[in-house]
């Protein structure tokens, strides 16, 4: 199991020093860079000790994906530029969380919102395929989004989109925040990427938790062979990072 850390690309050096296997930076941050800034970022990443295999925060919060005024053309143009940069940086996976972007607008029914989100996600999958990137849907807790709040809803979206480049992610923090059964990882025939943080405070995990073991065991029973990204807060990455890497790799082996 390779363990990564979610942070901006400026943190790739500290993340490598802490023992992480890769960095997972935000797409929207990369996409907003000037050409000059992106070129400097690309040089830094290519010279780093670890790769940027995965990316998160696919869309900027200023792009309301389900609103009538946001066109397919706008979405496609953004994705082409953003995912081209992701691929240039060596990215293979882009996480579609972006809770504010995918929120259901006031007055829109859930059915209409789901149908529109399906269209947007299919479009996203098409652009991702052209860029050689896989999109993973991240179910978020209801405090962060009003659309796709469970693994089951995420699996339904993946099924409705029916595109080989659109798959499902499980985030331990969101699963537990919504009191979902971790066993849904098995019931829904598996996931393509995973995030982890403590339930309390969404912090970098440095102490054992029975829930981690349960999640890892469910992932193993589906034959999971992907990555695990730590998406949590820390006051001292140099101390918490190595502790988290040791803990999670040990718990994965023992699950």
Image (cartoon, rainbow, N blue to C red):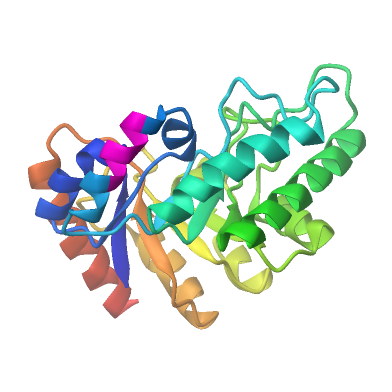
In reply to whether residue 41 is colored magenta, the answer given is: yes
Decide if residue 115 is on the left or right side of residue 70.
Answer: right
Point out residue 172 in the picture as x, y percentages from the top left corner.
Answer: 46, 52
Q: Does residue 181 appear in the picture of this structure?
A: no
> Against 125, is 33 above or below?
above
Q: Does residue 66 appear in the picture of this structure?
A: yes
The residue sitting at 38% across, 61% down in the picture is: 228
The residue sitting at 46% across, 59% down in the picture is: 194
Point out residue 46 in the picture as x, y percentages from the top left corner.
Answer: 25, 54
In reply to whether residue 227 is colored magenta, the answer given is: no
Tell which residue pokes out farthest to the top in this image: 106
Point out residue 198 in the picture as x, y percentages from the top left corner.
Answer: 34, 45
The number of callouts visible is 0
**Image quadrant occupied by the N terminus:** bottom left
| 163 vs 239, nearest the viewer | 163
| 136 vs 176, nearest the viewer | 136
Q: Give the range drawn in magenta.
A: 36-42
| 188 vs 45, nearest the viewer | 45
Q: Main secondary structure of the magenta part?
A: helix
Decide if residue 127 is on the left or right side of residue 250.
Answer: right
Quarter of the rendering containing residue 115: top right
The residue sitting at 57% across, 46% down in the picture is: 179
**Image quadrant occupied by the C terminus:** bottom left
Point out residue 29 in the picture as x, y percentages from the top left corner.
Answer: 42, 31
The residue sitting at 71% across, 35% down in the picture is: 75
> Against 133, is 104 above or below?
above
């Amino acid at each position: 199991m390779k363990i990564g850390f979610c942070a901006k690309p400026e943190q790739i050096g500290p993340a490598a020093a802490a023992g992480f296997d890769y960095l997972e930076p935000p797409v929207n941050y990369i996409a907003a860079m000037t050409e000059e800034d992106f070129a400097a970022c690309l040089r830094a990443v290519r010279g780093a000790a670890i790769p940027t295999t995965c990316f998160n925060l696919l869309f900027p919060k200023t792009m309301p994906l389900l609103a009538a005024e946001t066109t397919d053309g706008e979405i496609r143009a953004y994705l082409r530029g953003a995912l081209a940069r992701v691929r240039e940086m060596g990215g293979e996976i882009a996480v579609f969380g972006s809770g504010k972007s995918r929120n259901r607008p006031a007055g829109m029914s859930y059915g209409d919102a789901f149908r529109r989100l399906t269209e947007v996600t299919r479009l996203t999958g098409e652009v991702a395929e052209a860029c050689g990137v896989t999109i993973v849907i991240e179910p978020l807790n209801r405090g962060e989004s009003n659309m796709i709040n469970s693994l089951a809803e995420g699996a339904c979206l993946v099924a409705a989109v029916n595109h080989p480049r659109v798959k499902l992610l499980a985030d331990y923090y969101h699963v537990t925040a919504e009191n979902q059964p971790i066993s849904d990882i098995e019931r829904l025939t598996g996931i393509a990427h995973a995030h982890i943080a403590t339930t309390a405070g969404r912090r970098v995990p440095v102490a054992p938790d029975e829930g981690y073991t349960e999640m890892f065991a469910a992932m193993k029973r589906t034959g999971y062979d992907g990555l695990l990204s730590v998406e949590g807060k820390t006051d001292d990455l140099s101390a918490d990072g190595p502790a988290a890497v040791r803990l999670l790799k040990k718990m994965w082996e023992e699950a």
